[in-house]
């Protein structure tokens, strides 16, 4: 096998890995969100262990429930951000850089797309979710355009909650508060794991252009 053929095979392999990761994250993320959205009331929870719960929440903000005013602005920002990420992924694949870079960036891209789907489509295809005490039915899928909101106005579904421990009351400022009280989804975890691994193991590749020069 000549060098050109080997490079072509390597490029195909990297694209296959990137595509598989993106599809896996997207499909699993949407399955989890659908099951939670259509089987739980808002703020309902399932105790898996003393430190892990499935807690159904929705937000119009950023990852881990952080607030952001203007859902459509955030969605447009996410859409714009994905474009350079895809461009970087293409460069990494074409230059045959380490497979780990392909994996990390694919996880980040997949997680971003997962939450974009919520923002773009959930308001169009789902009915509103309500807390159990309001006595409203569990949300369900409706024909396109008959949901609780408009395009770019959907709420992101979150469900993973890890209340690892509560700070002792004597601890200044943090006393009585839960350590790591963020509620997140599979897409958020994909972004975080990809970004952390990228920083820990591949930060030297952030300056590819300088290295080439």
Image (cartoon, rainbow, N blue to C red):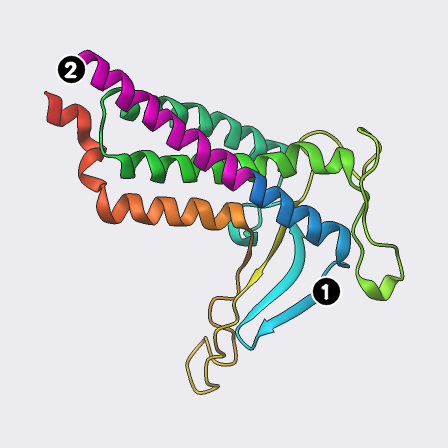
Which residue of the protein is positioned furthest toward the front in this rendering? 1
Q: Residue at position x 76%, y 55% from top?
A: 39
Picture quarter containing residue 48? Answer: bottom right
Q: Residues within 10 Å of mark 1 (few under 14, many from 20)?
A: some
Instruction: Give whichever of 39, 123 is nearer the camera.
Output: 39
Where residue 94 sits, quadrant-wise, is top left
Cβ atoms under marks 1 and 2 closer than 8 Å = no
In the image, farthest residue toward the bottom: 170
Magenta-highlighted residues: 1-26
The answer to whether one can see residue 91 in this image is no
Q: Which label sits in the foreground, 1 or 2?
A: 2
Q: Which mark is residue 74?
A: none
Closest to the observer, 116 or 34: 34
Q: Is residue 100 magenta?
A: no
Disc 1 secondary structure class: loop
Image point 46% across, 85% down: which residue? Answer: 168
| In the image, residue 4 lies in the stretch drawn in magenta | yes
Nearer to us in this view, 22 or 152: 22
Question: What residue do we see at 52% from left, 67% from top?
Answer: 162
Residue shown at the point (80%, 55%) measured from the top left: 130
* Residue nearest the observer in this picture, 209 or 171: 209
| Residue located beneath label 2 in the image | 3
How far from the left and from the top, in percent, is residue 193? Answer: 39, 49
Q: Does residue 174 lie above or below 210 as drawn?
A: below
In the rendering, at what x and y percent does residue 159 appear? Answer: 61, 57
Query: Mark 1 sits on what residue?
Result: 44
| Residue 121 in sight in this render | yes
Q: Give coordinates of residue 100: x percent, y percent.
A: 28, 39
Between the C-alphas of marks 1 and 2, the distance is: 57 Å
Q: Main secondary structure of the magenta part?
A: helix
Q: Earlier in the sequence, mark 1 or mark 2?
A: 2
- How far from the left and from the top, in percent, is residue 123? 74, 37
């Amino acid at each position: 096998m000549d060098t050109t053929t080997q490079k072509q095979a390597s490029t195909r392999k990297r694209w296959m890995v990137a595509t598989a990761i993106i599809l896996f994250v997207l499909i699993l993320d949407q399955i989890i969100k659908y099951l939670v959205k259509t089987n739980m009331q808002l703020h309902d929870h399932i105790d898996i262990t003393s430190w892990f719960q499935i807690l159904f929440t929705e937000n119009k903000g950023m990852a881990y429930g952080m607030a952001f005013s203007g859902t459509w602005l955030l969605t447009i920002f996410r859409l714009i951000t994905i474009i350079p990420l895809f461009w970087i992924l293409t460069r990494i694949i074409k230059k045959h850089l380490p497979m780990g870079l392909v994996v990390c960036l694919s996880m980040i891209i997949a997680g971003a797309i997962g939450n974009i789907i919520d923002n773009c489509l959930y308001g169009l295809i789902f009915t509103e979710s309500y807390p159990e005490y309001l006595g409203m039915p569990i949300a369900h899928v409706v024909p396109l355009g008959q949901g609780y909101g408009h395009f770019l106005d959907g709420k992101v579904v979150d469900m993973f909650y890890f209340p690892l421990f509560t700070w002792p009351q004597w601890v200044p400022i943090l006393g009585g508060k839960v350590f790591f009280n963020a509620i997140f989804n599979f897409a958020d975890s994909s972004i975080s794991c990809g970004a952390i691994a990228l920083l820990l193991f591949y930060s030297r590749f952030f300056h590819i252009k300088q290295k080439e020069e």
